[in-house]
Image: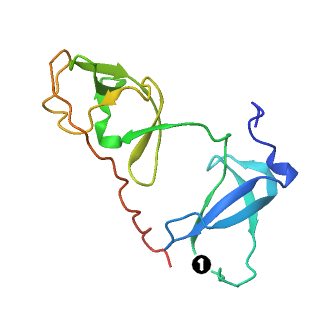
Amino acid sequence: MQKGEVKSARDNTIQVQGQLMDEKQWTLKGTIDFVDNQYDRSSGTIRVRAAFDNKDLFITPGQFGRVRVPMSQLKPTMLVPDAAVVTDQSVKLLFTVSPDGTVVPKQVELGPVSDGNLRVIRTGITPDDTVIISGLLRARPGQKVTPEQGKIEEAPLQPVPGAK
């Protein structure tokens, strides 16, 4: 909000998305209608409330769900399997393959992990890079490899223990 990418939540125009625990898509649309003016120091949170249209009474009292609140404008994002990220002391790396077939480690800045175990990569690689997603134990920097096309799939959502 400070950068001006998203309107203030106090304008009651911020669109949020919701899903019930058994849903895979974000089918519910709502708006933020309240933002508390108190910051909870013990948990580091601010209380926010969103209202969702429920004309068909699909949402019932006591039902659990998830809410997604936009924190910036949508922008292109690089996603890789979280298992492809290598740690070298305090540096996070992805092994890439150069056009001549050489393994090249690239330092990356990581973002959050999605529900399906895909990691957001903020900086360090481009869409043109070929990232090694399997066989990392056999890949060594400077070594020649023959890349094969892989398939990246999101893991299925896991149910939340104790959710109704």
Residue closest to the eye, 48 or 22: 22
Identify whether 81 is placed above or below 131: below
In the image, farthest residue toward the left: 138
Reply above or below: 79 against 64.
Answer: above
Tell me residue 26's x, y (percent).
58, 63
Quadrant of the image occupied by residue 62: bottom right
- Seen in the picture, residue 128 relative to 11 is either above or below; the reply is above
Q: Residue at x 23, y 16 (%)?
A: 100
Give percent across and percent down for residue 164.
50, 79
In the rendered structure, which amino acid carries the disc numbered 1? Gln
For this rendering, which residue is in front, 122 or 96? 96
Give the vertical position of 67 relative to 84 (above or below).
below
Dividing the image into 4 quarters, which one contains the N terminus?
A: top right
For residue 146, side relative to residue 160 (left or right)? left
| Mark 1 neighbour class, 10 Å CA radius: few under 14, some 14 to 19, many 20 or more | few
Relative side of 73 to 85, left or right: right
Viewer-closest of 125 and 31: 125
Q: Name the colour scheme.
A: rainbow
Q: Residue under label 1, please give it.
A: 63
User: Where residue 5 sits: x, y (%)?
Assistant: 74, 36
Task: Count all numbered tags in the image, as a single digit.
Answer: 1
In depth, the one of 160 and 144 nearer the eye is 144
Residue at the image point whose x is 25% and y is 39% from the top: 149
- Quadrant of the rendered structure where residue 160 is? bottom left
Going 43% across and 29% down the picture, which residue do you hit? 127
Please give left or right for residue 62 compared with residue 114 in the image.
Answer: right
Name of the residue lying farthest toward the right: 11
Q: In the rendering, at what x and y percent does residue 94 appear?
A: 32, 28
Q: Residue at x 29, y 37 (%)?
A: 84
Residue at disc 1, secondary structure: loop
